Amino acid sequence: MKMLAFDFGASSGRGIIGELKDNKIILKEVHRFDNEPVKLKNHLQWDFLRLVHEIKKCLLICKNNKEDIKSIGIDTWGVDYGLIDEKGELINNPFHYRDNRTDDMIEKCFEYISKDELLYVSGIDCNQYNTIYQLLAEKEDAYRLENAVSMLLMPDLFNYILTGVKKAEYTIATTTQLYDYRNGDWNYDLIEKIGLAKNIFPEIIQPGKEIGELTDSIKKELDINDCKVVSVGSHDTSSAIAAIPALDDDFIFIATGTWVMVGVENDDILVNETTKKYGLSNEGGIGGKVNLLKNIMGLWLIQESKRQWNKDGINIGFGEMVEEGLKAETSSIINPDDKLFYSPSDMPNKIKKYCEETGQKVSETIGEIVRVIEESLALTIKYTIEGIEKATHKRYNTIHMFGGGIQDRLLCQLVADATEKEVITGPKEATSMGNILLQGIGLGEIEDIKQGRQIVRNSIEISRFVPENADDLRTKYNKYIELIK
Ligand code: ADP
Ligand code: LRH
């Protein structure tokens, strides 16, 4: 049986077919496309119509290849949304979370609710990109909200375009900071308090449920058969975590892509002084789990460096950047989560500027810059794991690392060296795999996540990285702690 996963990541969007066979899952990429935001006037926005076009293109490729697709599942990064008017039309192109309209919105939010109370009910750290701050910014141009009858998070919006059904999938809803874990529903008190209409928030559904069939108009336009759309872990992080090939429960996960997410799976939300100090969030997971994690700025710094070098006429790819980094040495460290690195623009220059301003040797070569970024990421990961172990009063011995970043063997080795723990890597396309697993659960082909993880384990080659050179990063860690104070 074949299922189609659409995964909208920042580095690309992709359509991947997943097939369950002999207790294994076989992935086949059918379509990969750009998912770059567009700056229109002064605002960074999703290229939404292009992406709908890419979905249709992928469905046509499947049809022409005679792939019999039974269902579709969609996941994206968290927090972004579109507004729908009473005629069912999208009011405007969705804003991208890296747009600067939320710059002052965290402070504004605290006029309505204290930080402590917000953390207590939502479980989510106050990141300026969260939907709550985007909606507060939206209020400044009220005409859109005034005409909105629904607010749909991006996977929910794609699902709506495909089926005509408006639902809010649970895992992505928790990234808004407007979900109330204590009541298991939208935080309507807070929604009212900040001046939003309660009725624009659709009913929340769990992952692994059928949403609807493709609309007649899409079936007619593409001349394709009936196909179900199923809710998956539509927040990409939750889908990726579903596909961890773990045999037991106690492990640290590191999801590596544009963002790096470091965390553990818990049965309930955890908010205490330590989670606050380390900026940990509780994001909705699959099978009743809550993912206690930190979003670290991640391989965005590598992507943006590559983009700048390519723009400057240096034709270098990710693989070659890793090779340069492996040969280089550096004594400098950055805080990858510094606000300086958040928005798109000349990343290598920003890193040089950061080193200069913190009185460190300025990294010059491609290899040095890659090395500074990746050693600093590894140190941030170590710091975060220490926070998680303190917050949960547990020690974890195994790290599962997955996502596109595991193709970067320098990063994998540095994580093992910095944390002094064994790192198990795989799968590379964890998000799409998790997406397919959830469709399998939704269609009754897979029993639960435990069985799903066993299927992943049967299907992929895992690699292991053990600590080799811990001393160097142990010394640098003291410097890192000074830097982030
Ligand atoms: P997203 O969060 O955008 O879905 P991915 O999971 O696709 O991200 O991971 C993208 C990252 O994977 C890139 O930023 C890059 O750091 C890394 N990567 C991709 N291909 C390679 C490669 N061939 N060698 C090393 N690293 C790679
Ligand atoms: C990772 C992620 C993360 C944040 C960010 C906006 O892809 O979903 O959890 O929400 O993107």
Image: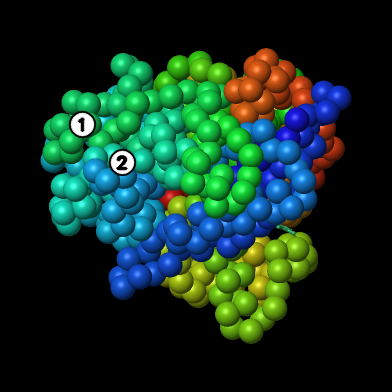
Distance between the Cα atoms at labels 1 and 2?
10 Å
Position of 133 with respect to 210 (left or right) is: left
Q: In this view, does 260 lie above or below 283?
A: below
Q: In this view, does 41 lie above or below 137?
A: below
Does residue 361 appear anywhere in the picture?
no
**Helix, strand or loop at disc 2?**
strand
- Give yes or no for contact between labels 1 and 2 (Cβ–Cβ under 8 Å): no
Ligand 2 near label 1 (Cβ, under 8 Å)?
no
Ligand 2 near label 2 (Cβ, under 8 Å)?
no
Residue type at mark 2 is: Met
* Position of residue 237 measured from the top left corner of the image (x, y, whole percent): 55, 38
Q: In this figure, which residue is indicated by the disc labeled 1?
A: 198
- In this view, the residue in front, 222 or 438, is 222
- In this view, the residue in front, 366 or 55, is 55
- In this view, the residue in front, 28 or 242, is 28
> What residue appears at the point 71 percent right and 69 percent down from the top-left corner?
317
Mark found first going from the N terminus, 1 or 2: 2
Q: Is residue 167 above or below residue 257?
A: above
* Position of residue 181 measured from the top left corner of the image (x, y, whole percent): 36, 21
Q: In this figure, which residue is indicated by the disc labeled 2?
A: 151
Position of 226 with respect to 425 (left or right) is: left
Circle 2 packing at 10 Å, graded few (<14), some (14-19), many (20+), is many
* Position of residue 217 measured from the top left corner of the image (x, y, whole percent): 49, 46
> What residue appears at the point 16 percent right and 47 percent down from the top-left corner?
146
* Position of residue 282 measured from the top left corner of the image (x, y, whole percent): 43, 29
Does residue 304 appear anywhere in the picture?
yes
| Identity of the residue furthest to the bottom in this view | 313
> What residue appears at the point 64 percent right and 39 percent down from the top-left corner?
225
